[in-house]
């Protein structure tokens, strides 16, 4: 693992960019690509990201937990990770540095979550939420923070700054778990009103729109990736983690390993998809991952795939803000409209609860199309 990282602000191709200079090895490159939206510069022979006013703090925050010292071009950049900013402008003293005791508590909490195999996204969300909360009470030791302080934080920071209900729930859940595990103290979160997240209908494309998006792809690799997402109802991350060994061509099955909820599942592969995958394999010959990135044995970049979809919908003339997840929603809805039992759809999507799958009944036109509007009878 890298020990030092130097960041340099340059103008690259008429755009301000921040270059990351470090000893280039596979582990370090994977770490950078995992946390930052980087691009490779062949001329500079370095990874770089878009410049913004918070980028240096973000880079320091990411590499702090990996014990990497970060420098700005001949100058040490940071000794600690600054609290994550939920707003464009920080308020209520959140720029204050956490004391050493709180830092140690956070490190232990992060280690505890890692040992319990929480996902990295959950760990990052909880730790960042706690940094904001503890920074709000920077003048107190964590042990001195009371239930009344949590209520005050909710009122004067979250509510006052009109932060989202999901952010509110994330921070409160993080505080509750942190105090119970690290400080052996119970916080009564029931004193805080916690609004439910809005229930939104999934966005669904018509079969004609899906066909148009897939048909405009001239690159067999891009076409195979988008087609596999739709034909198996995959999440983007599930597609990118697929390995060659996950395709069971003899049985016509795709094995999705350790997806959301750390569950394995299988999905049927159509003969058309298998034929397309064989054509793709002969053209690209991936070695480990089914869809590899710029370098062999590395996963394809999620942002690159999003860009592939963006270009496709532009060519089709579709003006909807289509995302990769729309293809998964469309897969489930089209299955339902074709008469597939809801229980099978639940298994194919990897949903733990049937209520999650039932939302597709609200966007399926299978039964709605049978309803005759009274307007037609006038």
Image (spheres, rainbow, N blue to C red):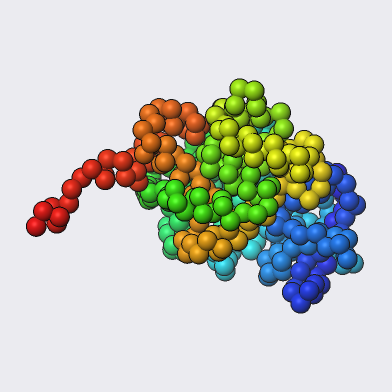
| Left or right for 234, reference 199 | right
| Left or right for 360, reference 95 | left
Residue at screen point 72% across, 32% down: 244
Residue 135, image x, y percentages? 60, 56
Residue at screen point 26% across, 44% down: 368
Residue at screen point 89% across, 51% down: 24
Residue 199, image x, y percentages? 37, 48
Residue 55, image x, y percentages? 71, 64
Q: Nearer the viewer, residue 373 or 357?
A: 373
Marker count (numbered): 0
Residue at screen point 88% across, 66% down: 43
Q: Nearer the viewer, residue 290 or 128?
A: 290
Quadrant location of residue 340? top left
Residue 21 in sight from this viewpoint: yes
| Left or right for 98, reference 21 | left
The C terminus lies in which quarter of the figure?
A: bottom left
């Amino acid at each position: 693992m890298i020990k030092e990282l130097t960041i340099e602000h340059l103008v690259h191709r008429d755009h301000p960019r921040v270059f990351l200079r470090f000893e280039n090895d596979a582990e370090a490159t994977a770490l950078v690509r995992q946390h930052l939206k980087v691009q490779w510069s062949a001329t500079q022979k370095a990874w770089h990201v878009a410049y913004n006013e918070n980028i240096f703090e973000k880079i320091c925050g990411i590499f702090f937990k990996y014990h990497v010292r970060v420098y700005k071009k001949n100058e040490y950049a940071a000794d600690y990770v600054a609290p994550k900013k939920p707003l464009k402008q920080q308020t209520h003293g959140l720029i204050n540095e956490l004391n050493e005791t709180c830092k140690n508590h956070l490190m232990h909490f992060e280690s505890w979550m890692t040992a319990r195999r929480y996902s990295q996204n959950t760990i990052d969300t909880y730790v960042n939420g706690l940094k904001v909360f503890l920074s709000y009470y920077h003048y107190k030791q964590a042990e001195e923070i009371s239930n009344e302080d949590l209520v005050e934080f909710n009122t004067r920071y979250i509510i006052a700054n009109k932060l989202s209900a999901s952010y509110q729930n994330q921070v409160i859940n993080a505080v509750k778990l942190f105090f119970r595990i690290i400080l052996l103290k119970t916080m009564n979160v029931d004193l805080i009103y916690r609004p439910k997240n809005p229930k939104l209908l999934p966005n669904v494309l018509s079969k004609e729109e899906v066909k148009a998006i897939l048909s405009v792809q001239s690159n067999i690799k891009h076409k195979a990736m988008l087609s596999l997402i739709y034909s198996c109802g995959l999440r983007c991350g599930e597609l990118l983690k697929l390995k060659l060994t996950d395709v069971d061509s003899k049985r016509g099955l795709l094995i999705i390993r350790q997806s959301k909820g750390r569950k394995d599942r299988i999905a049927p592969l159509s003969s058309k998809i298998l034929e397309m995958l064989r054509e793709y394999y002969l053209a690209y010959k991936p070695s480990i991952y089914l869809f590899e990135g710029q370098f062999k044995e590395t996963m394809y970049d999620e942002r690159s795939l999003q860009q592939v979809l963006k270009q496709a919908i532009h060519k089709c003339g579709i003006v909807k803000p289509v995302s990769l997840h729309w293809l998964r929603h469309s897969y489930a809805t089209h299955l339902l409209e074709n008469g597939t039992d809801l229980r099978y759809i639940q298994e194919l999507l990897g949903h733990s609860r049937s209520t999650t799958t039932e939302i597709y009944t609200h966007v399926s036109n299978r039964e709605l199309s049978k309803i005759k509007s009274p307007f037609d009878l006038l």
